[in-house]
Image (cartoon, grey):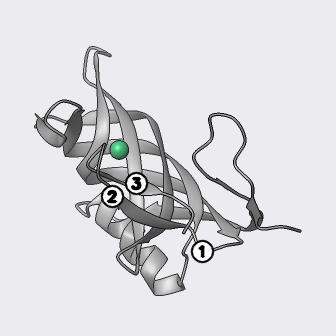
Amino acid sequence: MDEVVRPVGTTRAVFQFEAADELILSLKPDTDLVHSITEFASGKGIEAGSLVVIGALKSAKLGYYDQKKNRYREIKVDSPTEIASCTGNISIRSGEPFAHIHVVLADTNGNTKAGHLLEGIVFVAEVHLRVLQGPRLERRYDVPSGLWLWSER
Ligand code: ZN
């Protein structure tokens, strides 16, 4: 199996993986969701994966990427919320496993705030982590966007 597939059309890069493990994690309260998943991946040597999470957060910090200024604007969520949806991936950035996570959080009225998860203090978090096996999936700094993106060498 070719692990790196030639990009076609509008794709920047294409990588081919196989699912290695399906892990279910339950996180301890008062931990940071992003840090916990990153630390778990580091400890288990997981360099590529995808994840979904449901549960509830005590508080959170979300990022909104300003595409003109090329930087994140921070959105603070100071009250408890439901994790209505949370999805992400794991790859390598600067030689270390890096978790990129987005979230939709619902408040007491069901109103939502959403964005790039910078920090999420856990009340309950049920994580389904799919560990992927294949080529080295590495992020490199992309000057036009100001973001660390997947690219082929
Ligand atoms: Zn993001």
Q: Position of residue 128 (x, y in %)?
A: 58, 55
Q: Disc 3 marks which amino acid?
A: His
**Residue at 50% from the left image edge and 62% from the top image edge:** 90
The quarter of the displayed image where residue 130 is located: bottom right
Amino acid type for the residue under numbered disc 1: Arg
Residue, disc 2: 33
Above or below, comparing residue 43 to residue 118 in the picture: below
Compute the Cα span from label 1 to label 3: 16 Å
Image quarter where the N terminus lies is bottom right
Q: Quadrant of residue 6?
A: bottom right
Name the element at disc 1.
loop
Q: In this view, does 24 lie to the left or right of 61?
A: right
How much space separates mark 3 and mark 2, taking CA atoms?
A: 11 Å
Identified by mark 2, the residue type is Leu
Q: Relative to 142, is 78 above or below? A: above
Q: Which of marks 3 and 2 is nearer the N terminus?
A: 2
Q: State left or right for residue 46 relative to residue 95.
A: right
Label 3 crowding class (10 Å Cα cut-off): few <14, some 14-19, many 20+? some
Going from the N terminus, do you reach mark 1 or mark 2 first?
2
Give the labeled residue for mark 3. Answer: 100
Mark 1 or 2: in front is: 1
For label 3, being within 8 Å of ligand 1 is answered: yes
> What residue do we see at 55% from left, 53% from top?
51
Quadrant where the C terminus is found in the figure? bottom right
The quadrant in which residue 29 appears is: bottom left
List x then y, in percent, for residue 23. Answer: 63, 66
Which structural element holds mark 2? Answer: helix
Give the quadrant of ligand 1.
top left
Measure how far apart labels 1 and 2 are at the Cα level: 24 Å
Q: Residue at x 53, y 64 (%)?
A: 25
